[in-house]
Image (spheres, rainbow, N blue to C red):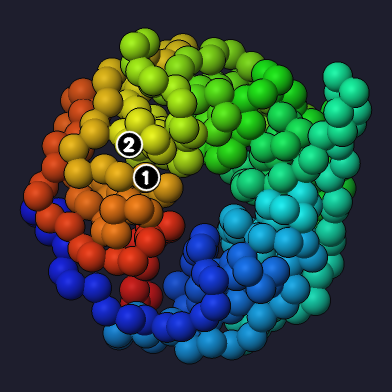
């Protein structure tokens, strides 16, 4: 982990229409949403090679599942369905296989300005206490909140049942600050990052700050945000801009958690649908969906700024980057 150089990619496993990935905390299993198949698949991981062996799959309960997580106890997979406009909980069996759904919720739109909202579940996340699940719904301009029981695998609507983002924001992805008391949501449609305080006892988000992810003079036509990631240090948060083809960089005040725009990195970036920061916080990898590669960047630990390492790996239409935890 000295240079951030990427080796030539090798095939680990095959499945139809995979996009988002999530690892089991025991490092033995991997789970993937199959968007075109409306399903979630389970794989066993070879601890030495990282090769994947298909175990089984289960229906996602809705069309185009696009995001999933494994709860910290390793007992459940939670997934969000985009065109289905819903979220689901699937139990994980002892052998890593997925069982039949233990909880499912269909999101419902309202009549606004004589037009019916169409729900689009875009991501689902759990808080640090593993007590609340938060599902960002782009179509409803809401983050729906559910009380989560990991033992039973149930999702129960919270009171209040949702956090309302600004109209037209289109909440897509969601990231926690390491303190567990601050959350960041990217508005896919209005090109914003929304900073929120979080009441962990009640599962309630409160809007704190909204900033644009684009420079003031940027052309907004054809743009949309995609991913939000907080640096492991808690000092920075990053948002990817498609169309503008950049990563927006924000510093986080250590006391107030307020954001300040630092700048943008656009070199070697083309449709950055997803990106991830490796565990030591030294490098950031960008999945350039239309660029056909994954590009590596060094992170300035003091400013958060990004510098291309010059290393890329050719991958056709990459849409998710995750770091595989091998071994025990």
Write down the quadrant of residue 196 in the picture.
top right
Write down the quadrant of residue 230 in the picture.
top left
Residue at the spot of label 1 = 271
Residue 306 in picture, x, y percent from top left = 20, 34
Q: Nearer the viewer, residue 274 or 159?
A: 274
Write down the quadrant of residue 183 in the picture.
top right
Crowd tier of the residue under label 2, counting other residues whose Cα lies within 10 Å: few below 14, some 14–19, many 20 or above? many
Q: Helix or strand or loop: what does disc 1 sit on?
A: loop
Residue 271 in picture, x, y percent from top left = 37, 45
Q: Is residue 191 left or right of residue 33?
A: left
Q: What is the count of numbered marks?
A: 2
Q: Is residue 18 left or right of residue 91?
A: left
Q: Helix or strand or loop: what does disc 2 sit on?
A: loop
Crowd tier of the residue under label 1, counting other residues whose Cα lies within 10 Å: few below 14, some 14–19, many 20 or above? many
Q: Residue at x 37, y 54 (%)?
A: 289
Q: Is residue 230 left or right of residue 104?
A: left
Asked if residue 1 shows in the view, the reply is no
Q: Residue at x 86, y 28 (%)?
A: 115
Residue 126 bears which disc, if any? none
Residue 65 in picture, x, y percent from top left = 66, 60
Q: Give the mark nearest the N terminus, 1 or 2.
A: 2
Residue at the spot of label 2 = 245
Residue 235 in picture, x, y percent from top left = 33, 27
Quadrant that contains the C terminus:
bottom left
Quadrant that contains the N terminus:
bottom left
Q: Is residue 272 left or right of residue 59?
A: left
Position of residue 164 relative to residue 287, above or below, is above
Q: Residue at x 55, y 40 (%)?
A: 173
Q: Are marks 1 and 2 in contact (CB under 8 Å)?
A: yes
């Amino acid at each position: 982990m000295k240079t951030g150089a990427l080796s030539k990619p090798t095939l680990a496993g095959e499945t139809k229409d995979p996009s988002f990935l999530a690892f089991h905390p025991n490092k033995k299993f991997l789970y993937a949403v199959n968007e075109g198949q409306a399903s979630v698949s389970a794989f066993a991981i070879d601890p030495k090679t990282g090769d994947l062996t298909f175990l089984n799959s289960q229906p996602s309960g809705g069309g185009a599942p696009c995001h999933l997580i494994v709860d910290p106890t390793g007992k459940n997979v939670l997934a969000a369905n985009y065109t289905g406009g819903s979220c689901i909980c699937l139990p994980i069996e002892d052998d890593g296989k997925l069982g039949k759904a233990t909880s499912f919720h269909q999101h419902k739109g309202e009549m606004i300005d004589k037009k019916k909202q169409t729900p689009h579940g875009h991501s689902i996340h759990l808080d640090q206490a593993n007590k609340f699940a938060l599902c960002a719904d782009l179509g409803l301009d809401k983050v729906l909140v559910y009380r989560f029981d990991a033992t039973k695998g149930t999702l129960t609507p919270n009171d209040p049942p949702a956090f309302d983002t600004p109209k037209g924001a289109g909440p897509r992805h969601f990231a926690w600050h390491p303190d567990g008391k601050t959350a960041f949501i990217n508005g896919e449609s209005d090109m914003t990052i929304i900073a929120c305080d979080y009441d962990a006892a009640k599962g309630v988000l409160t809007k704190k700050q909204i900033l644009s992810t684009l420079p003031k003079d940027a052309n907004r036509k054809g743009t949309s945000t995609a991913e939000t990631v907080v640096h492991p240090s808690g000092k920075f948060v990053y948002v990817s801009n498609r169309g503008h083809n950049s990563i927006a960089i924000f510093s986080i005040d250590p006391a107030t958690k307020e954001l300040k725009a630092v700048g943008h990195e656009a070199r070697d970036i083309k449709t950055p649908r997803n990106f991830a920061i490796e565990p030591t916080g030294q490098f950031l990898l960008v999945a350039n969906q239309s660029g056909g590669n994954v590009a590596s960047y060094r992170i300035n630990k003091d400013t958060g700024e990004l510098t291309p390492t010059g290393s890329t790996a050719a991958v056709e239409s990459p849409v998710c980057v995750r770091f595989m935890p091998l071994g025990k």
